[in-house]
Amino acid sequence: MNREKGFTLIELLGVIALLALLSLLVSVPVTKHMQEANQKACEGQLNNIVLAAKQWGEDHKLDLPEEIGTQLVLSLAELKREGYIEEEFKNPITKNNFSDELQVIVTKEGKRYWSYDVVASNSVRADQISKIDLFHGLNGDNQPFSGDYHYIGMNPHNVLHFSEACFSIVNIAKNGSLKLVYEGPVSTNGSCEHVRSSSSGKLEVSQPWNASNVNDWKNPNTTIRKTLENLQDKPDLLHIRTSDLEKLEDATFYVGAAGTGPNGSLLNDIQTEQSNSYIGKVGTLNVTDYVKVCASTQGGAQNISVAFSGGYCPGSYLQKDYSYWFMNAHPNSEVWLFSSAAQSKIDLKYPNTALYIRPVVYLKANTYLTGTGTDEDPFRVANENICQKK
């Protein structure tokens, strides 16, 4: 009598291991898809609250803000009490009802236009964040993206968790937008405690300039420009969700041609920040950022040329243990400005050297933030703070 041959123990264990591996491979994208779906569903619920607030605005036109830039605050509780919301809106992520303390900020933006933003009750507009740790001085002309207030020191309250990345806020621009320098992805526990690391935020560019050692920002073949355009097309490389790009400005990044010493063009460039500009959503740190932070830390405008030529930034959060290229060129087209990690200063470097860049973006001024800006409690975009698991 023939007996059918069954699986051996080893074969069964192999099948189980294979099934476990397949389950793991499938569960990761499924989990990510569910998280994205919940995020969109949460944002959809916030949009329903906005629609209710807009209906309130239609019925109370005489109560809406009259002067451009002025605001009115509506709470979720008020909208419920007056009958504009008749059901409990549930957060698909936390599975709890939205708090009645949730606010809708109504802002007069134009002659017949009001914006409506749903924010947590403790939020503030980006252009109105606390000026603690900020230095006001060495500001440029009234160009929209010229730096006005700069964060200084080693540990200022300037940490921002935006999208899926951590940033340091470098300055508040003339137009109220925040200049952010990339510090890396959020850690696995969702914190930004690594932003003070001496190695955070670097992005390597192996051949910074083109074959002729020219960094012409109008030349599409310039390697560093192509890198920036690639980051804009693929924001996930900076751990920024594509849906979050709308919160960023199409900014004018200062390029300039900074010269050294008291008779050079550096002081003029710092004050004007408008020559040879590059426009895009992603740029790099420029020499004026570095010098303003250094000079303001060390005593103000009189130290600009000194900060340029000798170790004046070891106490700054912009100082890292690696060297990185700035956006600016020296008037001599064969050498380029960079931050020398070893000497803690700005220096010149031939372009055939492989170095890093510090990617920079501008967060729109009308974005609402929560948090205090510390490593443990970073600023966050207010509606992201609502649509996240506590």
Image: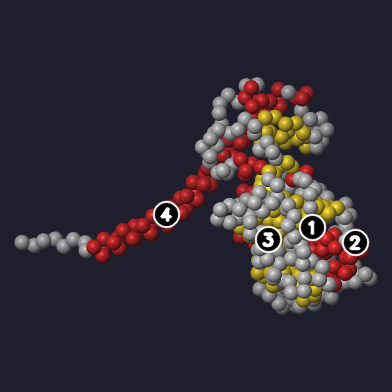
Three-letter code, disc 1: Ile
Count all numbered tags in the image, as a single digit: 4
Identify the residue position indicated by label 3 in the image.
196
Q: Quadrant of residue 301?
A: bottom right
Identify the residue position indicated by label 4 in the image.
26
130 w.r.t. 232: above or below: above
| Residue furthest out toward the left | 1
Q: In whole angstroms, how far apart are the C-alphas of marks 3 and 2?
A: 26 Å
Kindly check if marks 1 and 4 are in contact, taking CB atoms under 8 A apart as contact: no
The nearer-to-camera label among 4 and 2 is 2
Three-letter code, disc 2: Ala
Q: Quadrant of the C terminus?
A: top right
| Residue furthest out toward the right | 263
Percent position of residue 191, x then y: 61, 53
Q: Quadrant of the N terminus?
A: bottom left
Kindly check if marks 3 and 1 are in contact, taking CB atoms under 8 A apart as contact: no
Identify the residue position indicated by label 2 in the image.
301
